[in-house]
């Protein structure tokens, strides 16, 4: 399932105040089951942010309408489409 599907099914109401050790263990198990995926998604978003910062810095030096500008624009669109297909 996609990230959007997972978050649309997430409900904070699933988690209520902890009143027992058993309940605490259930919360801990839920957290641990999802934590690796969270780390992977966090890493992916960090890489995307870095790429887009680099695009932005490179873009500032280009003249609108130039061939280099159009090439950078095309590359950026491809990157956005690629990353949106991952999520």
Image: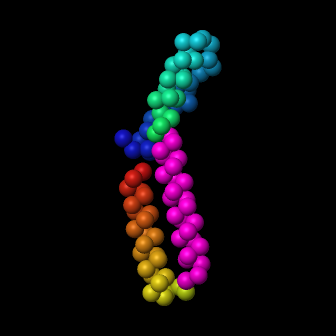
Q: What residue is drawn where x is 45% and y is 81%? A: 70
- Please identify the quarter of the rendering in which residue 16 is found: top right
Q: What residue is drawn where x is 55% and y is 83%? A: 62
Residue 74 image point, x, y percent: 42, 75
The stretch in magenta equals: 38-62
Q: Is residue 43 magenta?
A: yes
Q: Nearer the viewer, residue 56 or 2?
A: 56
Residue 25 image point, x, y percent: 54, 17
Q: What residue is drawn where x is 39% and y is 53%? A: 86
Q: Main secondary structure of the magenta part?
A: helix
Locate the N terminus and report the quarter of the image it occupies. top left
Q: Is residue 37 magenta?
A: no
Q: Is residue 1 above or below residue 27?
A: below
Residue 23 image point, x, y percent: 55, 15
Residue 11 image point, x, y percent: 52, 31
Q: Is residue 76 above or below residue 67?
A: above
């Amino acid at each position: 399932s996609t990230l959007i599907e997972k978050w649309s099914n997430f409900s904070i109401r699933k988690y209520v105040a902890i009143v027992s050790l058993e309940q605490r263990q259930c919360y801990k198990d839920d957290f641990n089951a999802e934590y690796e995926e969270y780390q992977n998604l966090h890493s992916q978003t960090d890489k995307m942010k870095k790429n887009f910062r680099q695009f932005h810095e490179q873009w500032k030096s280009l003249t609108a309408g130039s061939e280099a500008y159009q090439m950078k624009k095309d590359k950026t669109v491809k990157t956005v489409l690629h990353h949106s297909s991952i999520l």
